[in-house]
Image (cartoon, helix red, strand yellow):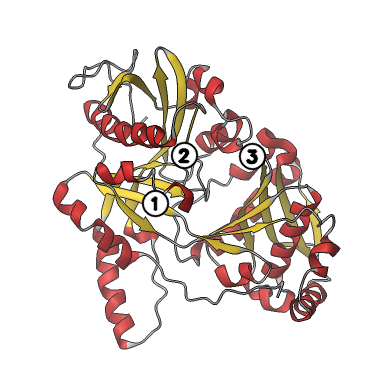
């Protein structure tokens, strides 16, 4: 494994078996683990009851079937010997090649593409992600309710320095941190990160849709549309009428996992930004561990699997996860738009309050009722000189999607 637990004293902090003392909070201790199986039941004591993404079943799937190049770390925070907080981390070598240029093919764009291409080949940062690159939203850490939000964020900020020292003593040097994703309402508390030299950066916004209580069926959703968007939806349904949809159980996912992965890779290869390349066994693992809270819906045309989408019911939210389909059939059968409508149908049927459509394809998601919600990340390079240029590097390399927000309800 990449990481190992150090028994060496780091500066003024204790070894990992008893917990490291945090710099600005000496009454707290931090323990670091490199595998979920190594974490004690203290993790389960703290984990939130309504969030799959910080619970063992989901996290064990990601660890057992990891994205290519990923490893993991788990933090447990203690106060007076009692566990009070947990934090999930992913460790990888971030490459600018994860960001793909989609510029127009003019002279300036070609010059820009050349410069970006050079950076893509040379920029590599061994990174600790506080959070989950496979998800959108605040799924990085959780503390007991009696710890103030500002204190929680200060503890996470302290933990980044402690973790860096811990890994260096273990023989691994990480020179970058990325803390993701934070909502507008928590920006004040994120000032704790800025105090430690982190920079605020943004990628694409998350797209989310609230489900009103009065929507008891998909027909109620369509009835709320303006006539223009209702006509558009009916046209999409007509184009997709020959598609046969099927919910996959674990066995069917296993039987079709190669084709599912092939469809996923086709979409992933064309994405403007990709932090991770999924393990082909990931979806089967989710179905086995999460049961009915994970759904994979297959789209069949002429007895051939031509598309799929996945969702995870997470408390009162439905998380639109990964998809795949044959792009050449999208226009003729409106596959992607039908998938978005089907996710809304599923969310209403399952009684959730919100659907999280995640990033990318912003305009078409807004056309089914999703609204952009800005998410903020905080990043830093541990060397002061390159850290000064981090915001400019992210701004320069990050893809820009030009889009017009739509509102089907007006």
Q: Residues within 10 Å of mark 3 (few under 14, many from 20)?
A: many
Q: Residues within 10 Å of mark 1 (few under 14, many from 20)?
A: some
Q: What residue sits 66% from the left and 54% below the top?
A: 355
Q: Relative to 32, is 352 on the left or the right?
A: right
Tell me if residue 56 comes above or below residue 96 in the rendering: above
Q: Earlier along the polypeptide chain: callout 3 or callout 2?
A: 2
Label 2: which secondary element:
loop
Q: What residue sits 46% from the left and 72% below the top?
A: 401
Mark nearest the camera among 3 and 2 is 2
The residue to which callout 3 is attached is: 286
Which of these two is toward me, 179 or 169? 179
Label 3: which secondary element:
helix
The answer to whether any part of residue 89 appears in the image is yes
**Residue 146 in the image, given as x and y percentages of width and height:** 49, 26
Label 1: which secondary element:
strand
Q: Earlier along the polypeptide chain: callout 1 or callout 3?
A: 3
The residue to which callout 2 is attached is: 140
Q: What residue sits 33% from the left and 54% below the top?
A: 200
The residue to which callout 1 is attached is: 377
**Residue 98 in the image, given as x and y percentages of width and height:** 39, 58
Q: Earlier along the polypeptide chain: callout 1 or callout 2?
A: 2
Q: Quadrant of the C terminus?
A: bottom right
| Discs 1, 3 touching: Cβ within 8 Å | no
């Amino acid at each position: 494994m990449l990481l190992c637990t150090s028994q060496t004293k780091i500066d003024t902090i204790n070894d990992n078996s008893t917990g490291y003392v945090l710099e600005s909070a000496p009454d707290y201790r931090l323990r670091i683990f490199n595998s979920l199986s190594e974490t004690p039941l203290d993790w389960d004591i703290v984990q939130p009851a309504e969030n799959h993404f910080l619970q063992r079943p989901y996290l064990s799937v990601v660890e057992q079937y990891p994205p290519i190049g990923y490893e993991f770390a788990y933090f447990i925070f203690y106060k007076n010997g009692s566990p009070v907080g947990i934090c999930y981390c992913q460790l990888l070598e971030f490459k600018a090649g994860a960001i793909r240029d989609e510029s127009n093919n003019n002279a300036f764009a070609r010059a820009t593409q050349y410069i970006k291409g050079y950076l893509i080949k040379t920029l590599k940062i061994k990174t600790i992600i506080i959070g989950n690159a496979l998800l959108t939203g605040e799924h990085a850490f959780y503390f007991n309710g009696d710890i103030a939000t500002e204190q929680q964020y200060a503890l996470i900020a302290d933990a980044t320095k402690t973790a860096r020292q811990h890994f260096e003593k273990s023989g691994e040097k990480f020179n970058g941190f990325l803390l993701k994703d934070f909502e507008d309402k928590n920006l004040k508390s994120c000032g704790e990160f800025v105090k430690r030299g982190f920079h605020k950066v943004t990628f694409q916004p998350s797209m989310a849709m609230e489900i009103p209580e009065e929507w008891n069926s998909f027909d109620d959703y369509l009835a709320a549309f303006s006539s223009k968007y209702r006509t558009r939806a009916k046209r999409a349904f007509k184009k997709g009428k020959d598609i046969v949809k099927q919910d996959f159980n674990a066995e069917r996912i296993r039987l079709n996992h190669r084709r599912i992965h092939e469809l996923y890779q086709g979409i992933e290869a064309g994405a403007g930004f990709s932090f991770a390349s999924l393990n082909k066994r990931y979806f089967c693992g989710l179905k086995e561990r999460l049961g009915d809270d994970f759904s994979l819906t297959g789209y069949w045309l002429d007895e051939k699997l031509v598309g799929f989408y996945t969702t995870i019911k997470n408390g009162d939210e439905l998380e639109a996860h990964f998809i795949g389909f044959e792009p050449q059939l999208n226009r003729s059968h409106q596959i992607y738009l039908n998938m978005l409508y089907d996710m809304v149908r599923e969310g209403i049927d399952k009684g959730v309050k919100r659907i999280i459509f995640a990033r990318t394809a912003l305009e078409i998601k807004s056309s089914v009722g999703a609204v952009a919600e800005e998410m903020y990340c905080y990043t830093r390079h541990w060397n002061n000189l390159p850290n000064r240029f981090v915001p400019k590097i992210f701004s320069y390399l990050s893809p820009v999607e030009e889009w017009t927000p739509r509102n089907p309800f007006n």
